Amino acid sequence: MGETDGGIPILAGTVGGLLAWGLGYLLTYMVAADRIMGHQAAQFLERTTDGAAGWKLVGWLFYNAHHVDISLPQLGILSPRGYNAIAADDGMLWVLYLLPPVLLVITGLLVTWLSRTPIRSAHHGAVVGATVAFGYLLGTVGGLLAFTVGVNGDAIRPDPVPSILLAGALYPMICGAIGGTVAGLTTRVFHGIGRAVSG
């Protein structure tokens, strides 16, 4: 399924990465939407900006879960340039920090396990698992555009550079590779057990 000559399932990884991104956003919405919509800052944004719909605010929170700040317009010398709602929260929003790595490790594991090419080693599994970065980066760039809110000729949005490098590339490459490594190791163990039983 869309595999290169070296047995790397680019298409499967891309689809898996996009699904992981979409599921991550959906779970963030389910966990935090009510809390976000009821916050005074969210209600203020809804009234004063063009297009600050609730789904965009949840999108900001999803980028915060990747340790990406929301870039704010510079209103003065001492005004903050970025904001992370999870870091500022004193409740249970911190659990959202766990969401991207857990989803990406599982996705890397599944993409590797479901690959039609036999996984030759843990290293090969890591490479296959890291292919989820292709789709996750697409989702991240799309979200960066979709979650931008205009305000007085300026924009509030996830910080573009960390969004692409951290959320779109490093998170899925590292976590997907971890999942792929686990899949590669377990595949070798199961094959070894199978050979021992059949022998």
Image (tube, rainbow, N blue to C red):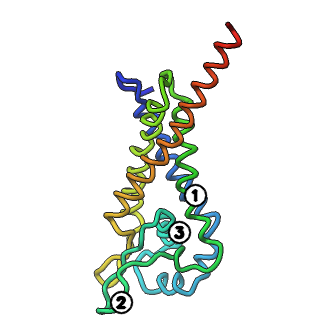
Residue 58 numbered mark, or none: 3
Callout 3 amino acid: Val
Quarter of the figure with residue 191: top right
Say whether disc 2 or disc 3 marks the residue closer to the N-terminus. 3
Number of marks present in the image shown: 3
Toward the viewer: 38 or 140? 140
Query: Can see residue 141?
Result: yes
Callout 1 amino acid: Leu
Residue assigned mark 1: 99
Toward the viewer: 72 or 130? 130
Query: Can see residue 14?
Result: no
Toward the viewer: 4 or 177? 177
Give coordinates of residue 16: x percent, y percent.
50, 41
Give coordinates of residue 13: x percent, y percent.
45, 38
Quarter of the figure with residue 199: top right
- Secondary structure under badge 3? helix
Instruction: Identify the residue at horizontal 58%, vertical 64% (top origin).
Output: 96
In the rendered view, would you say 48 is above or below 143? below
Residue 79 numbered mark, or none: 2
Say whether disc 1 or disc 3 marks the residue closer to the N-terminus. 3
Q: Specify the quadrant that holds the N terminus.
A: top left
Callout 2 amino acid: Ser
